[in-house]
Image: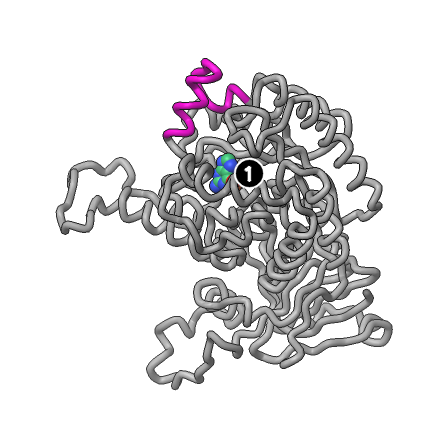
Amino acid sequence: MDHLFLGSVAHCESRDYLETFENGFVAIEKGKIIGIGDRSALPPDYLNSLPVTTLSPSQFLLPGFVDCHIHAPQYPNIGLGLDLPLLKWLDTYTFPLESAYSNTDFAKQVYEAVVRRTINCGTTMASYFATNHKDSSLILAYEATKQGQRAFVGKVCSNNASPDYYIEKTADSLRDTETFINDVLNLNNPLVRPIITPRFALSCTSELLNGLSDLAAKYGLNIQSHISENCGEIEAVKDIFKKETYTEVYEDTKLMTSKCIMAHGVHLEDEELQLFKKYGTSVAHCPTSNIKLRSGLCDVRRLWNAGIKVGLGTDVSGGHNASMLVAIQDALNVSHCLNIFKKQHIFGSGRIQNPNDNSNKNYEPLEYKHALYLATLGGAHALSLDSVCGNFAVGKDFDALLVDISKAPLDLFDIPASVNEKSIASHGRVDKMVQKFLYAGDDRNIVKVFIAGKQVKNDHSI
Ligand code: GUN
Ligand code: FE
């Protein structure tokens, strides 16, 4: 697609800097960004050579969302079975559902829907877990291809401590993974890649984990798994593998690479953070799921302070919503809760604990621009895709959302200047639109979605 957008634009230049243009432009040639800036800097020939869209005052462009961790097969369970903690939840609700993907007709039905839904919610890149089954995992890769979504797709691997109706033999798991890798690569779709996906240490033997890291090295692939989500899980891993920490299990099996992303990391110890930093391994923060499965509150600031790359994930269906906007809102909620616990020491009873303990006094909760960073450039960085997407830097693919804050559930008002002059009116107009969308918007505010310059959602009501 060749195109020129004129109007408001916002994107994360870095973790702390949200760059905005009220009267801006983004120019696209063959799906890639060739220019961005203030309208005053627009090269005049762009106006003549590119088809133009002028945004309305309630609209702006934002980079597409990067969902760093989502289980596509768990989509039918969204909003169900959130009454149990992780290990019981897996056994009771999740493994039985995932085992149903031996049926490829069912897989096709669900995967078509989940790709459609996530695109409509603004997910331009998703790192998907499928199931143990290679054939239905490939159907997910087809669906992403068909609907134009950028995706990593992983055939899940589990050969240990799993129910007998949903477990693989080591050799089969490795053979099927290699077949799956070649099948996805043969789709010849630059947007869709296979990703090595051991479910988590508890459901894999060292032999399988080693075999999978060899495959990652052989094909130069990214890796995804889970780590330190739940205290019971952590104790079980240390006990079975006889290790001091969870991270050492993945270190010993060569899975800790700079192209590896581990979901959760809620309870990582300081020594483990150093290992993440050393290997350049990332964390997918999944706040919605961490609250719903009562796993814990992950401190993103602590991970950042240790120099770790962090992205954001919905973790459907531990997370009860496929929308990254909900993950953004929950990332802010978790950070605000941590702030309450760390800084104010005030609990629900009204009791003030340790009023003299000032150790966490300087804790600053995340702001909306940080949550946006996690959901866009931070996620792209965490998946080693930041040279391709994540913001509107020249040379990247145009993965974008056209947002309209005049649509439900938001309403716009002209607040009389006399009462508004000292308040939020002083914030920039685009900053305010971004803030409103992130805190209070939903997918109805996302009227168009573009991936690599191709429009994949169009709300014709605009
Ligand atoms: N750990 C292992 N498998 C899963 C899963 O499906 N969801 C979550 N949240 N954690 C896991
Ligand atoms: Fe998960």
* Total marks in image: 1
421 relative position to 162: left or right: left
Residue 400's spot in the image, x, y percent?
A: 66, 62
457 relative position to 43: left or right: left
Q: State the residue lying farthest toward the top.
A: 242
Badge 1 crowding class, 10 Å Cα cut-off, few under 14, some 14 to 19, many 20 or more, is: many
Residue 183 or 152: which is nearer the viewer?
A: 183
Residue 280 visible in the shown view = no
Q: Residue at x 53, y 47 (%)?
A: 313
For residue 32, which quarter of the picture? bottom right
Q: Give the SS element for disc 1.
A: loop
Residue 121's spot in the image, x, y percent?
A: 58, 62
Residue 125 or 153: which is nearer the viewer?
A: 153
Instruction: Report the predominant secondary structure element of the magenta stretch.
Output: helix
Q: Residue at x 45, y 22 (%)?
A: 237
Q: Residue at x 56, y 77 (%)?
A: 58
Disc 1 residue type (three-letter): Lys
**Residue 26 is a magenta residue:** no
Image quadrant containing the C terminus: bottom right
Image quadrant containing the N terminus: bottom right
Residue 421 visible in the shown view = yes
Residue position marked by numbered label 1 in the rendering:
309
Q: Which residues are magenta?
A: 232-249
456 vs 298: above or below: below
Ligand 2: does it lie within 8 Å of the C-beta at label 1? Answer: no
